[in-house]
């Protein structure tokens, strides 16, 4: 099944099988499952097709802007069912929807698709900020390697009692701070990883 190969479906499926209630509270102290943790786990996979595309697009092409980047992404996308489009300063991924009566398939339609895509930093973050994330990730050996370090720090912050939002903010700051990255790149990486829209659109 193609959707199982995409980050969109994987994140939604992981959250569903873990039993997240559609009406779960947003309060960090009462969340039954750590949704931020699930997203970080997905982005830690070097073999995820979208992670690979973002890592592999040459910087000299990416720096030419969304239109040229979309051309490259669509030419080299062999696994994701959908297309990339340029929309102003954004690069957006438009997944193919399958018509099926299953609850899980319904969860990857409409607002949920776009909210989950936001978690991987595409649809609602300007391409220029994605380039900042790509620059940072390169110094760590790629997006998956950066995510693994952030995830390790994130779990530590959670064990210390921080809620999801504060934990991911501190984790990103600690990991990037060790290499001397400034506020602009720290904020870009945080926005790439944060997952408010997933909770708001899919689980409330």
Image (cartoon, helix red, strand yellow):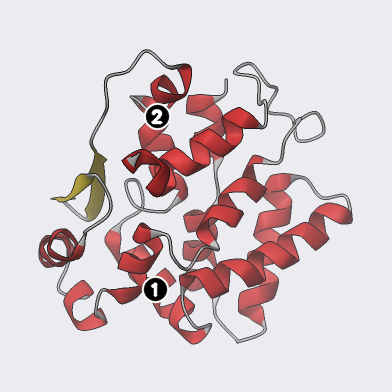
Quarter of the image containing the C terminus? top right
Numbered label attached to residue 134: 1
Q: Residue at x 64, y 40 (%)?
A: 35
Q: CA distance from mark 1 to mark 2?
A: 26 Å
User: Does residue 6 appear anywhere in the picture?
Assistant: no
Residue holding disc 2: 108
Left or right: where does residue 41 sit relative to residue 68? right
Considering only vertical position in the picture, is 146 above or below 3?
A: below
Q: Residue at x 40, y 24 (%)?
A: 105
Q: Position of residue 157 (x, y in %)?
A: 80, 59
Left or right: where does residue 164 sit relative to residue 68? right
Q: How many marks?
A: 2
Which of the 4 image quarters holds residue 25? top right
Q: Residue furthest top?
A: 101
Q: Residues within 10 Å of mark 2 (few under 14, many from 20)?
A: many
Q: Residue at x 50, y 35 (%)?
A: 12
Q: Residue furthest front?
A: 1
Quarter of the image containing the N terminus? top left
Left or right: where does residue 53 sit relative to residue 186? left
Q: Position of residue 127 (x, y in %)?
A: 28, 61
Considering only vertical position in the picture, is 160 above or below 139?
A: above
Q: Position of residue 87 (x, y in %)?
A: 16, 48
Considering only vertical position in the picture, is 107 above or below 113?
A: above
Marked residue nearer the N-terminal end (1 or 2): 2
User: Does residue 58 appear anywhere in the picture?
Assistant: yes
Q: Secondary structure at mark 1?
A: helix
Q: Residues within 10 Å of mark 1 (few under 14, many from 20)?
A: many
Which of the 4 image quarters holds residue 82? top left
The label nearer to you, 1 versus 2, is 2
Which of the 4 image quarters holds residue 160? bottom right
Name the foreground residue: 191 vs 122: 122
């Amino acid at each position: 099944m193609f959707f199982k190969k995409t980050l969109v479906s994987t994140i939604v499926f992981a959250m569903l099988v873990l039993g997240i209630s559609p009406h779960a509270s947003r309060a960090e102290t009462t969340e039954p499952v750590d949704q931020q943790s699930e997203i970080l786990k997905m982005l830690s996979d070097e073999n995820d097709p979208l992670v690979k595309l973002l890592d592999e697009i040459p910087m000299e092409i990416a720096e030419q802007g969304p239109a040229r980047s979309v051309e490259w992404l669509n030419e080299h996308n062999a696994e994701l069912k959908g297309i990339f489009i340029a929309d102003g300063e954004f690069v957006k991924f438009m997944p193919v929807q399958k018509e099926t009566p299953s609850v899980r398939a319904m969860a990857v339609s409409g607002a949920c698709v776009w909210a989950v895509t936001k978690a991987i930093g595409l649809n609602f973050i300007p391409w220029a900020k994605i380039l900042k994330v790509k620059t940072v990730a390169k110094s760590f050996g790629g997006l998956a390697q950066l995510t693994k370090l952030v995830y390790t720090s994130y779990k530590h912050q959670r064990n210390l009692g921080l809620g999801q939002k504060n934990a991911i903010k501190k984790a990103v700051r600690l990991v990037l701070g060790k290499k001397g990255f400034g506020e602009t790149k720290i904020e870009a990486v945080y926005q790439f990883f944060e997952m408010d829209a997933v909770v708001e659109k899919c689980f409330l």
